[in-house]
Image (cartoon, rainbow, N blue to C red):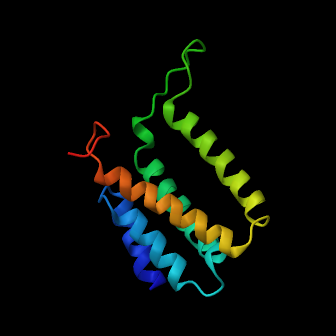
Amino acid sequence: WLVFASFLTGFAKAGVTGLGPLVTVIFARATPGGPKRALALIQPVLVASDAAVFWRYRSELSRKDDARRPPPLELVLLAWTLLGVGLGQMSLGQFADQTVRHVLAFVLLVLLASKALPAGGRPS
């Protein structure tokens, strides 16, 4: 199941909507050792897929050396992503498995609810 979920991660990164939560559920249920271990397994998969995309589109980054120009959005997002990953890794050990399960369930429900609502935020 974990290999299948890793395969689906590629499709999710390619833009197939709705696969991200499914991959998360598969990893959380199929990983022996609980949700913390699942997060530890899925993180390198996500980082590797992001690195592959970044490598593929690196030539499209702005390469001008204008000091007044703000850094490219990709670098700003990369910095915030690294900060979030680092803080997540440091804090994950502080929580019990049951708490991690509840947080994952809450995040998945919020993601599913956001997909169910139209762009205006109100149900039709």
**Could you say where residue 83 lies in the image, as x and y percent from the top left?**
68, 45
**Could you say where residue 31 lies in the image, as x and y percent from the top left?**
57, 83
Name the side, left or right, on which 116 lies relative to 70.
Answer: left
Q: Quadrant of residue 118?
A: top left
**Could you say where residue 76 lies in the image, as x and y percent from the top left?**
57, 34
Above or below: residue 62 compared with residue 115:
above
Measuring 72% from the left and 60% from the top, which residue is drawn there? 89
Above or below: residue 58 compared with residue 107:
above
Q: Quadrant of residue 94?
A: bottom right
Given residues 111 and 69, the one toward you in this image is: 111
Q: Quadrant of the C terminus?
A: top left
Given residues 110 and 16, the one toward you in this image is: 110
Name the side, left or right, on which 122 lies relative to 32.
Answer: left
Given residues 115 and 62, the one toward you in this image is: 115
Name the side, left or right, on which 111 lies relative to 89.
Answer: left
Above or below: residue 29 compared with residue 92:
below
